[in-house]
Amino acid sequence: MRRISWMLAMVLVLSALLAACGKKDAAAVVKDLNEVVGEMESYQGAGVMTLHTGDTPQQYKVEVWHQKPSYYRIALTNAKKDVTQIVLRNDEGVFVLTPSQNKSFRFQSNWPDNQGQVYLYETLIRSITGDTTRQFADEKESYVFDVAANYNTHALVRQKIWLNKSDYAPKQVEVSDSNANVVVDVKFDSFKFGTEFEKDAFDMQRNMTAATKEGGQTGTDSGVTPAEQTGNESGKEPANPQTAPEPDGAVTDGQTGVGGDTEQQGTEGAATGQEGEEPTLAEPEGADSFGVIQPTYAPEGVQLKDDQILEEAGDYSVMLRYEGTYNYTIFEARPQDRAVSLAPSRVLDLGFTLGMVSGDALQTLTWTTDGIEYRITSADLPDNEMVRIATSMQEESGK
């Protein structure tokens, strides 16, 4: 009896010591995470995202800004090509900007509310709190959660999320497929809650012009910076440079392309122009031949049927046709001056940028990289296969 009492006392002492050291279980951490998200006003993070979807891993520098209620700025820089695209959300809509080419595309979309993003804090926390079968590990400096992936694609199944113990900031994310292969890996170099941004930090025109002020440089040196902690009240205003938000349900998803001249019209011209048309896209410099860019990935049972170089009226474009398990066509071209009908669409996250999916029975995925517009059209190709094909084309050059 005396031995049992002694052992019980030791267990109680150890429990007290662990409690004093702040050791938490999964339930306690999840409770804290809900409070963090509920009280969060803004954050700024930076790191490296690696996509393992092709023959060789592709790395992108990622910089993420968020300001309540719904402002986002994500700068994605191709580490190999040193080309930056900025995904921006403000009251005017969602934009994909390529400052180095003075190009912007506007979507009417509720992104990212309707889909997860591996580099967004809210998405990671929703994955943790929403999975009742979550697995939890307490490491030396991190809390680690293994939960279901929720990225609107069947190709991504599980994800591991490392959170800093001190403030619950994300440190690393690994997203895996059904074979436990890591498909996407994000490692954060820095992450800070409560960042105070300049008033126009999420303004489309500011982001387009600031990136080219220093000799055309882009990326995290874009010149759009968080507000300095100088006590200047004007620098502490929440970023709200836009006009009043559009009424819920008043618009359908669509895309507006803007580009060309230095004094570009911006999206106001798109909003006030004729319904159903986009502004014309000015011809980029170097609109000559870019060869034939072939994806390094094709779904199992699919083969290239033929490819054609189309040169009509001075325009250069390429068409590749694939057949087999799935049948689809890839079209490549440098955008020329033209008016394009504005079709209902939805946003698809490609990892390195956002794409637009339009059509119903016959769907077309459209995105732009390095001045080249790509379109994949198919009646039976799933979204996850479109993403893998698009990703495999990013490191390829024309042949």
Image (cartoon, rainbow, N blue to C red):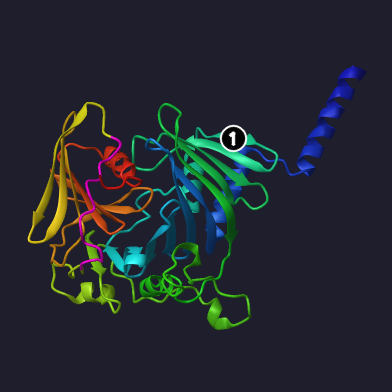
How far across and how far down the image is residue 121, in percent? Answer: 50, 52
Residue 368 lies within the magenta run: no
Magenta highlight: main SS: loop
Residue lying at 42% horizontally and 26% vertically, measured from the top left: 179
Whether residue 178 is visible, yes or no, is yes
Say whether residue 17 is left or right of residue 319: right
Residue 362: x and y in percent read 13, 44
* In the image: residue 251, left or right of residue 83: left
Q: Which residue is mark 1?
A: 136
Q: Is residue 33 above or below residue 143?
A: below
Crowd class of label 1 (few under 14; some 14 to 19; many from 20; radius 10 Å) = some
Give the residues drawn in magenta, as a range: 283-297
**Residue 60 x %, y %:** 45, 51
- Amino acid type indicated by mark 1: Phe
Query: In the rendered view, would you say 253 is above or below 161?
Result: below
Residue shown at the point (28%, 59%) measured from the top left: 371
In the foreground, 326 or 170: 326
